[in-house]
Image (cartoon, helix red, strand yellow):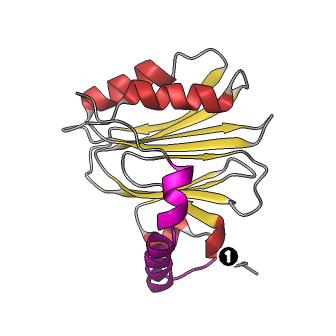
């Protein structure tokens, strides 16, 4: 039997945003972002500390600042990274900057890279902050393995967007736009 989760445990990360969790907050079980098309999402997870980070970067994002925030968040802990996104015809420069700033850090391993596909679809990403498991889908109903149907998932997304305004200011710093 599939089990439902409490959508209050999901923290949404907007484009140009970063979500960080300490692994000690039972109220934040998942980090989520959506519409990752020509953008690149960087997901970091440390099994040692159970800290998680999710960045949704676009071509105007300050990738160096995002990498610095990841380094500050994870410290010297080993981190597994997942890099998801980009489009072959639009994102080569962004993907190169992301790989250059994130993949060369000592103790960080790129465990998954799904970059520059031929198609132009957009991805929905959900990260389980307790296990580090990354769910990736191009359809809302595929992203939720516990059995939500597309209308319910879309409605949940709207509820998250409406209810997250106060916590986003505190929890998710916006990456500065490169000058």
Whether residue 24 sits left or right of residue 121 in the image: it is: right
| Residue reaching furthest to the left | 89
Q: Is residue 174 visible?
A: yes
Q: Position of residue 34 (x, y in %)?
A: 41, 59
Q: Place residue 112 in its image quadrant.
A: top right
Classify 126 as above or below 151.
above
Residue 66 sits inside the magenta stretch = no
Work out whether residue 27 or residue 95 is closer to the camera in this orientation and state it.
27
Residues rendered magenta in the picture: 147-172
Q: Quadrant of the C terminus?
A: top left
Q: Position of residue 124 (x, y in %)?
A: 44, 59
Q: Is residue 12 visible?
A: no
- The residue singled out by tag 1 in the image is 6
Classify 176 as above or below 156.
above
Work out whether residue 84 or residue 65 is closer to the camera in this orientation and state it.
65
Q: Position of residue 131 (x, y in %)?
A: 74, 50
Classify 4 as above or below 112.
below
Q: Place residue 26 in its image quadrant.
A: bottom right
> How dense is the environment of label 1, judged by Cα within 10 Å: few (below 14), some, or many (20 and up)?
few
Residue at point 80%, 34% (across, down): 48
Whether residue 151 sits left or right of residue 111 in the image: it is: left
């Amino acid at each position: 039997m599939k089990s439902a989760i409490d959508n209050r445990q999901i923290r949404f990360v907007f484009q140009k945003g970063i979500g960080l969790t300490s692994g000690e907050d039972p109220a934040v079980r998942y980090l989520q972002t959506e519409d990752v098309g020509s953008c690149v999402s960087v997901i970091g997870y440390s099994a040692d500390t159970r800290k998680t980070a999710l960045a949704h970067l676009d071509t105007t994002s300050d990738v160096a600042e995002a990498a610095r925030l990841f380094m500050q968040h994870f410290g010297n802990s080993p981190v597994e990274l997942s890099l998801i996104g980009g489009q072959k015809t639009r994102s080569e420069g962004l993907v190169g900057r992301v790989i250059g700033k994130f993949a060369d850090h000592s103790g960080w391993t790129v465990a998954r890279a799904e970059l520059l596909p031929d198609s132009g679809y957009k991805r929905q990403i959900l990260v389980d902050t307790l296990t580090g498991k990354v769910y990736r889908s191009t359809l809302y109903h595929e992203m939720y393995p516990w059995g939500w149907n597309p209308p319910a998932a879309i409605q949940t997304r709207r509820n998250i967007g409406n209810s997250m305004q106060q916590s986003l200011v505190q929890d998710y710093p916006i990456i500065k736009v490169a000058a």
